[in-house]
Amino acid sequence: MRAASDLPAAMTTPPAAYLDPRTGRTWPLDPPRWCGDGRAPLLLTPLPGLRRDAIRRERRSLWRYAAALPFAPEDPISLGEGCTPLVPRRVAGATALLKCEWFMPTGSFKDRGASVMLSLLRAQGVREVLEDSSGNGGAAVAAYAAAGGMRAKILVPAGTSPAKTVQARASGAAIELVPGSRQDCAEEALRQAERIFYASHNWHPFFLHGTKTLAYELWEDLGFRAPDNVIVPCGAGSNVLGCGIGFEELKRAGEIARPPRIFAAQPENCAPIARAFLGAPAAAPAPTIAEGTAIARPIRLPEVLQVLRDTGGGAVMLNEAEIGAATLDLARGGVYVEPTSAQAAAAFAKLLASGAIRAEETTVVVLTGTGLKATPRIAELMGVSL
Amino acid sequence: MRAASDLPAAMTTPPAAYLDPRTGRTWPLDPPRWCGDGRAPLLLTPLPGLRRDAIRRERRSLWRYAAALPFAPEDPISLGEGCTPLVPRRVAGATALLKCEWFMPTGSFKDRGASVMLSLLRAQGVREVLEDSSGNGGAAVAAYAAAGGMRAKILVPAGTSPAKTVQARASGAAIELVPGSRQDCAEEALRQAERIFYASHNWHPFFLHGTKTLAYELWEDLGFRAPDNVIVPCGAGSNVLGCGIGFEELKRAGEIARPPRIFAAQPENCAPIARAFLGAPAAAPAPTIAEGTAIARPIRLPEVLQVLRDTGGGAVMLNEAEIGAATLDLARGGVYVEPTSAQAAAAFAKLLASGAIRAEETTVVVLTGTGLKATPRIAELMGVSL
């Protein structure tokens, strides 16, 4: 249901569509679709965004921003995702606003994308979905499929430790072990996508329209203004793109003058986006403690780079020692997050030190997932044997 | 800082004090104190509560209800605790309102108590605290001590698996392994309490004034009315007592006509409170999957029973199969919580079946902790080897 104030915009804006940003080709939102011609990654055509009087303030979930979505499910699949706290803390001698995205049903920001993507797919009649992820994405898709009465099949590399998939398995998802690497697993998913709808947190454009609610929320948290800077851990880039889309919509709606500068934090051991942004030579990926951002071939590389450039933001590469130290520093202040997440705090310190951002600016550090998912890694950092 | 509307009440009410409810003896709130004569457990004297216009609505944490506390720290130790979602879901053929208390800094409701208790203690000059808990209580006290720049020492039984204490250890807490049982550990804590301030989640009365914010929040969630029933997992009873105190204050403030009926869910294998309430014979405790509620000797047994009786509520005992089934049922709906928490849902089903509560009533099922802390237990329930 749209607020009356949105009607004029809706009446003059063409209907939203899937968009291949590299060719300009569009497709209607129905039937369900996750890619374009030749397996091109899709976005949506630009949306009008929402104005503050269209927020459904009685809803304590990201569905308070439903008017910013191009569909209005009567009964969204919601488990209380979103409305996470923004907590000011001293980091590296300056104040960072920690956006605590692990206050979520499954413990990570991925619940934003899963809630929106699967609410759409269920409304479109999809009853079974395929996903490939042994991490936060798989847990989120499995939980929201379960909450929505849908079946889920999650492909994970055969070497994945059983503990990592207990959460997705408990949702009733079928876990299929795929021999080989993470990349082999992604390729197997593309093959099976011929038979089961591929509700991929990396591919489906509505996943990004879930993560974009982070931008709306930050704007509302800050009294309806944009921060100066947003720093996010970056693997495939769904938070960079989500923030890019969300803040651009807020600008389009006349709610903010310009988006914040968006900065992507990546592990030096697997940093294709940061290397491309910084003009550093490509490098073969190596293992990293920041597992959630170890994406060697991000499918939306050009679009992510464009957000970083368009907003005047940037990219930061972090070595393993820096990531580990940031994880423990946060924990020693009571903030217990995955090493993947801690990269945003490490990047804040480096950006301050380099002068790229200043202490007196309003800077959001997005902490994407709970440390409870990384017990073995954090134990290792402390030298504790499990 | 109190709102003007509270001033008349504050002017006519005697200053708050520690109260031994069994003797009526009181002590001033300063100096710091965790027990009465002969190690009697303390409460506070009755407080006036708050009216809805005293809520600090700009605060997204339990500190929005600061006017309901008898102290007003300028700079509370806050990590965004509270303001958790209340999610309607079908359980056992009826609608339960799931209060998702794991959307918290350390993943459990214990953060409410830790935030309030340690904010008081820090304001009182305490710089080092002692706690005994290998579970949610220890993690919460360790994190808030860390966030507040205080030292923490956590005693845990020597047999505790190292994985269980990684979270508290990462906060910088000193973990001390105590030979023997959980009870031996509690007794060692009482000995060490001569030297270090005992900031026990079981003993300190301000912990309960943190957990009482659950009642305020439910009242606000429901549009400033009390639910008909609240069902909580019950170990030592901090949520029963917190709800008892909070709703009683709301009644005193004229905001509600009467408190909801409060129901305690306990594992049959360790159910001293439920047995006492139901008049069942005492039984030696046995191991239970609901570890967080395995408290063989709850120190506030009479006070917990009184809340259950005064509110017209009750107690429910659950066997291991019922607890396990409820855990998996919730997970298969996307709600991934500890077996300890799932007891509240299992009790909801039993209370419905017995006719003690009716489907058309407004019933809150309090889910206290994330399933991510119980991976080995949940794997076991599914027959997955880790």
Image: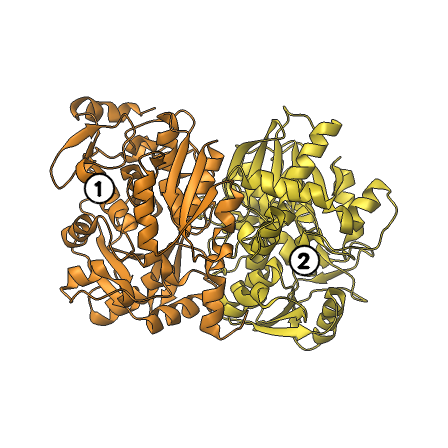
Chain colours: A yellow, B orange
Q: Are marks 1 and 2 on the same chain?
A: no
C-alpha distance separating marks 1 and 2: 56 Å
Q: Residue furthest right?
A: A281
At which x and y percent is residue A316? 75, 40
Q: Nearer the viewer, residue B158 or A177?
A: B158
Subunit that carries the residue with mark 2: A
Question: Against A88, is B364 above or below?
Answer: below
Q: Quadrant of the C terminus of chain A?
A: bottom right
Q: Residue at x 26, y 47 (%)?
A: B243
- Viewer-proximal residue, B268 or B216? B268
Q: Residue at (46%, 53%) from the top-left corner?
A: A80
Residue B325 as seen in the image, left or right of residue A56:
left
- Label 1 marks a residue whose chain is B
Residue on which disc 1 sits = B41
* Tag nearer the camera, 1 or 2: 1
Total numbered badges shown on the rendered structure: 2
Whether residue B51 is situated above or below residue B305 in the rendered picture: above
* Residue placed under numbered mark 2 in the picture: A205
* Residue A163 quadrant: bottom right
Is residue A273 toward the left or the right of residue B312 in the image?
right
